Image (cartoon, grey):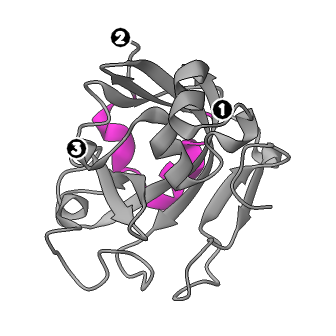
C-alpha cells in the first residue's frame, strides 16, 4: 500500500488543507481493484460557514465532521450522488474539504465501467462522478484517510501560479467566499 498523508496534515488551517490537497492522490482499494486520481479541485467548508453541513450543529448525517481530523465525511446528495470530504481541525471543530474533482490515474477501465463512459474527462469531473468512478459510497463514511483502503497520499505540489482561488459551486449561502481551489487549465475540473 502506498503511504498516506499523516493524520496531523489535516490539523492545519482548513483553507491551507484545501490548497495543499491539490496535486495529492485520492486512492480507494475496493474489492474490485484500485482506482485513484490526482486531486485537481477542492472546496473548503468552515465552522462559521452558512454553506457548511455543520453550521447548525451535529446531526446523524454530519456527525463525522465533529469527530477527529483526517477522516472521510461521505454524504448522499440529490438522492443520487455520494460526495467525499476530508475532515479537518481538532475534534469538535467541524470543518472539512470537499474533493470536487480528480484527474484519473489508476484503474481507468474500472472507472469507465462504473461511470458507463469511455471519455476520461467525464470520469471524475465532479464530486458525485469521482465517488462513482472510485466506488466510494456511504460505507466509507468515517473511514480514516491516513490508514486503510481509502486514503490520500502526497503527490506533486503545484506552483502557486497554477492554483486558482474562486467562489464555490452549487451553493446559495456564503456563495461569495473564495473557498474553491483548482488547478488552472486542468481539463478535469468540474466547472470552468
Locate residue 161 relative to residue 157 in the image: left or right.
right
What whole-number distance in Å separates the C-alpha atoms at marks 1 and 3?
A: 30 Å
| Residue for badge 3 | 139
Q: Is residue 123 located in the magenta-colored stretch of the structure?
A: no
* Residue 120 shows in this picture: yes
Residue 173 in picture, x, y percent from top left: 51, 88
Nearest the viewer among 182 and 115 is 115
Judging from the image, what secondary structure is the residue with disc 3 in? Answer: helix
Q: Residue at x 47, y 57 (%)?
A: 98
Query: CB of mark 1 within 8 Å of CB of mark 2?
Result: no
**Magenta stretch bounds:** 5-23
Q: State which mark lies toward you, 2 or 3.
A: 3
Position of residue 82 in the picture relative to residue 93 (left or right): right
Q: Which quadrant would the C terminus be assigned to in this image?
A: bottom right
Q: Quadrant of the N terminus?
A: top left
Nearer to us of marks 1 and 2 is 2
The circle drawn on residue 1 is 2
Amino acid at each position: 500500500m502506498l503511504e498516506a498523508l499523516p493524520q496531523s496534515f489535516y490539523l492545519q488551517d482548513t483553507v491551507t488543507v484545501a490548497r495543499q490537497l491539490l496535486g495529492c492522490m485520492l486512492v480507494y482499494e475496493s474489492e474490485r481493484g484500485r482506482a485513484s486520481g490526482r486531486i485537481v479541485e477542492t472546496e473548503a467548508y468552515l465552522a462559521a460557514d452558512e454553506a457548511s453541513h455543520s453550521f447548525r450543529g451535529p446531526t446523524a448525517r454530519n456527525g463525522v465532521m465533529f469527530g477527529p481530523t483526517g477522516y472521510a465525511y461521505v454524504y448522499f446528495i440529490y438522492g443520487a450522488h455520494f460526495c467525499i470530504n476530508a475532515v479537518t481541525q481538532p475534534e469538535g471543530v467541524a470543518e472539512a474539504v470537499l474533493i470536487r474533482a480528480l484527474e484519473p490515474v489508476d484503474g481507468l477501465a474500472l472507472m469507465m465501467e462504473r461511470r458507463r463512459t469511455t471519455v476520461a474527462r467525464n470520469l471524475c469531473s465532479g464530486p458525485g462522478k469521482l465517488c462513482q468512478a472510485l466506488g466510494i459510497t456511504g460505507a466509507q463514511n468515517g473511514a480514516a484517510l491516513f490508514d486503510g483502503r481509502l486514503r490520500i497520499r502526497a503527490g506533486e505540489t503545484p506552483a502557486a501560479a497554477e492554483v486558482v482561488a474562486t467562489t464555490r459551486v452549487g451553493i446559495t449561502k456564503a456563495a461569495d467566499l473564495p473557498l474553491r481551489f483548482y488547478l488552472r487549465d486542468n481539463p478535469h475540473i468540474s466547472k470552468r
